[in-house]
Amino acid sequence: MATKTSQHFPIPLLVEFYIEEINRLNPVLNGVIEVNPDAVYLADTADKIQKANSPSSLSKLHGIPILMKVNIGTKDKLNTTTSSFALLGSIVPQDAAVVAKLRKAGAIILGKASLSEWSMFRSFNVPKGWSARGGQGKVSLDR
């Protein structure tokens, strides 16, 4: 496989690979709440930018797909819900600061990763990694 430093590797292929892996593994792991429906489009755009510029002019994060926790606000088609149905469909006014910085660096927000509903603030008796939207996750990002 080509590396970013040696030759061009198509960003859409990388994004499509990760989407396929999420689709394959998520029914067992329940680690991803949703995939960005614009991820492949964003990858195509990033790929065109990469082809039109020298590698040294782009951030090392350019074209890298990243999952955000579901409680980090993204101003796009993804939901920011803390894994709860109560916030499904809510609209955040802007990207969280970390998301804005990642986008500016050229990263692609691939989707939202699950976490314990309300980040375990709802109850201490709920199993770690459980949420109404994602079910019981095998992999939880809570620490």
Image: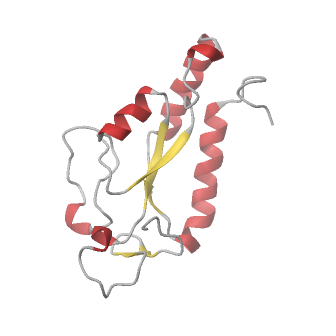
User: As drawn, which residue projects farthest toward the front?
Assistant: 143
Q: Residue at x 58, y 51 (%)?
A: 19
Q: Quadrant of residue 81?
A: bottom left
9 or 129: nearer the viewer: 129
Residue 127 drawn at (x, y percent): 39, 84
17 or 141: nearer the viewer: 141
Q: Is residue 13 above or below residue 28?
A: above
Residue 98 drawn at (x, y percent): 36, 40
Q: Is residue 10 left or right of residue 136?
A: right
Q: Is residue 111 left or right of residue 1?
A: left
Q: Is residue 84 left or right of residue 39?
A: left
Q: Quadrant of the C terminus?
A: bottom left
142 or 36: nearer the viewer: 142
Q: Residue at x 81, y 37 (%)?
A: 1
Q: Residue at x 35, y 33 (%)?
A: 100
45 or 63: nearer the viewer: 63
